[in-house]
Amino acid sequence: MKIIIINGPNLNLLGQREPTIYGQKTFEAFFEFLQMEFPGVTLHYFQSNYEGEIIDKLHEVGFTYNGIVLNSGAYTHTSIAIADAIGAIETPVIEVHISNVYAREKFRHHSFSAPKCIGSIIGLGLKGYELAIDYFLKG
Ligand code: DQA
């Protein structure tokens, strides 16, 4: 079972960035925890602040991996290109947002990518990534 977590812009600053919204844990520390929690899964992590790099990674893994957990950050609300990339690949994608985007500014309420994903997990903090992996494992 091969699963990748793809994080988009500004998510490299988790732990430092607006901790009241995104928490105090770095993603690297959380990723180590995930690897321990799911020893049977080949778990990869990719982060980029660049739209094209996220699209390239979706193309690269999107025909061979079993699942993609995607938090494309603000690109969620703006990028038709990332939504098209999700539609173009075969691997199922679960969209994750750490914060409850529906309790925030109106521009965060719309996702171009959500209709292309098998589901979305929103507002449950880092736990959302864990739940998404668990879904890919157990269905
Ligand atoms: C986010 C929500 C987005 O609106 C925001 O731009 C982010 C993070 C989240 O995980 O809550 O960068 O995707």
Image (cartoon, helix red, strand yellow):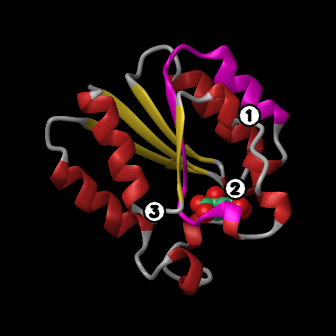
Residue located 58% across and 78% down the image: 21
Looking at the rendered image, the disc whose residue lies closer to the viewer, 3 or 2, is 3
Distance between mark 1 and mark 3 Cα atoms:
23 Å
Numbered mark located on residue 50 in the image: none
Quick check: 39 left or right of 45?
Answer: left
Quadrant housing residue 136? top left
Nearer to us in this view, 45 or 99: 99
Label for residue 124? 3
Q: Quote the CA–CA distance across marks 1 and 2.
A: 13 Å
Residue 101 occupies quadrant: bottom right
Lower position in the chain sequence, tag 1 or tag 2: 2
Magenta-colored stretch includes residue 96: yes
Amino acid bearing label 2: Asn
Range shown magenta:
80-102
Q: Position of residue 113 (x, y in %)?
A: 70, 36
Residue 45 shown left or right of residue 48 in the figure: left
Q: Nearer the viewer, residue 67 or 132?
A: 132
Reading the chain from its start, which is encountered first: label 3 or label 2?
2
Residue linked to disc 1: 82
**Residue 26 in sight from this viewpoint:** yes
Of the two numbered discs 1 and 3 on the same chain, state the one appearing first in sequence.
1
Q: Is residue 107 magenta?
A: no
